[in-house]
Amino acid sequence: MSEQFFAPCPRGLEPGLQDELSALGAGKIRQVPGGVSFTGDWALAYAVNLESRLATRVLWQVAHGRYHGEQDIYKLAYGVTWAKWFTPEQTMRVYVTARRSPLKSLEFITLRIKDAVCDHFRTIKGVRPSIDTANPDVRIHAFLSNDEAMLYIDTSGEPLYKRGFKQAAVEAPLKENLAAGILRVSGWQPGEALLDPMCGSGTFLIEAAQIALDIAPGLGRRFGFEALKTLDESVWRRMRKAAEGRRRHVAKLPIFGSDSEGVQVKRARINLEAAGLADQVTLEQAELTERMPPAAEGVMVANPPYGVRIGESSELAEFYPKLGDALKARWAGWRCYFLSADPELPKLIKLKATKRTPMFNGALECRVFEYKVIAGSNRREKA
């Protein structure tokens, strides 16, 4: 039976997510800003959770209808057959997002949907589920437009960018699905040299190594659908086993990471070890403006600071021209990709960007700047 699903993702990654869903066999795929809707069976929902590198969640639509006020939304939620999919012994939480909704209080709508679900269980089972805002068994999402409400059960649980093994976090971390999206935009292919010279907690390195070794991104974690009555354990077991059997085993990959700060290199090493990838990736402490390329050509990806790690804008104004000079001096033959929300970067780096791809890091509008460094090239960006 075909079900309706919606997979949110960071804005800018919708085309890549559509490609992923198409490759997995999804039907009726449609992009909207911030995600992709699609249809398919439950096996497809398992597969998208397990295999998608770009989706943030996979939401299963269980109801939709028009509304004028809060009571219409209560009725819509009360009429859903929640007891078919989970038990009152399981905990739950309700999340509400809205765009152009005339209703004033999302907190009140959240409470009304929670009441409707609990009242449904009390009517059917004589007992209501408990609420757990920290680690619920079942997550219910509501989305309100100006006159329509949609209700979903979250089949993912924790967001899919939480791959299940990361231990050492850093400030303003780059989400794993955004890192995977930037790797896709770069056109990097396994076997090609890859360097993150500002590696932080190692997100780019881990994502690239998993791609190179064909490791399904969801193998290290559990999912929300495993708590639902709809779970077909035999199908899910076979799917996981097939994904585990696909993993390639390679002693060393041409994937390199460095950072000017020793503490960041240590964090990246901890995370690579937790992911079982420490032996495959080469790490060192080095300043980007001084280090040498690890190969004659390759792809550089980085999330340079926009006032977070290096500090004040005056320091950045000093750093960007040095970065541009270093690229021209030593990195001919490399394609370089920098995610930045700083409008000063393209001016101060003084190189001509060959491409600028809009992408959102959370609510922050960024660009992925592509610089193809050509030997002898001295092309400069006009300030």
Image: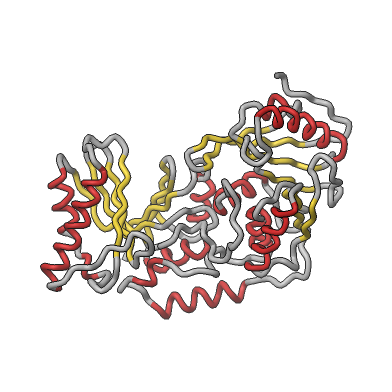
Question: Taking the image as drawn, is residue 195 in sight?
Answer: no
Q: In this view of the protein, which residue sits in the foreground, 141 or 376? A: 141
Quadrant in the picture for residue 155? bottom left
Residue at the image point whose x is 42% and y is 48% from the top? 36
Residue at the image point whose x is 71% and y is 27% from the top? 317
Quadrant in the picture for residue 370? top right
Residue at the image point whose x is 12% and y is 47% from the top? 71
Q: In this view of the protein, which residue sits in the foreground, 93 or 350? A: 93
| Identity of the residue furthest to the bottom in this view | 234
Residue at the image point whose x is 57% and y is 46% from the top? 172
Q: Quadrant of the C terminus?
A: top right
Residue 57 x %, y %: 43, 56
Q: Is residue 270 left or right of residue 29?
A: right
Residue 117 x %, y %: 20, 61
Q: Quadrant of the N terminus?
A: bottom left
Q: In this view of the protein, which residue sits in the foreground, 127 or 76? A: 127
Q: Is residue 41 above or below residue 188?
A: below
Question: Taking the image as drawn, is residue 173 in sight?
Answer: yes
Residue 254 x %, y %: 78, 58
Residue 2 x %, y %: 33, 62
Rendering colour mode: secondary structure
Q: Is residue 349 left or right of residue 88?
A: right
The image shows a total of numbered marks equal to 0
Q: Is residue 106 left or right of residue 34?
A: left
| Identity of the residue furthest to the top in this view | 383
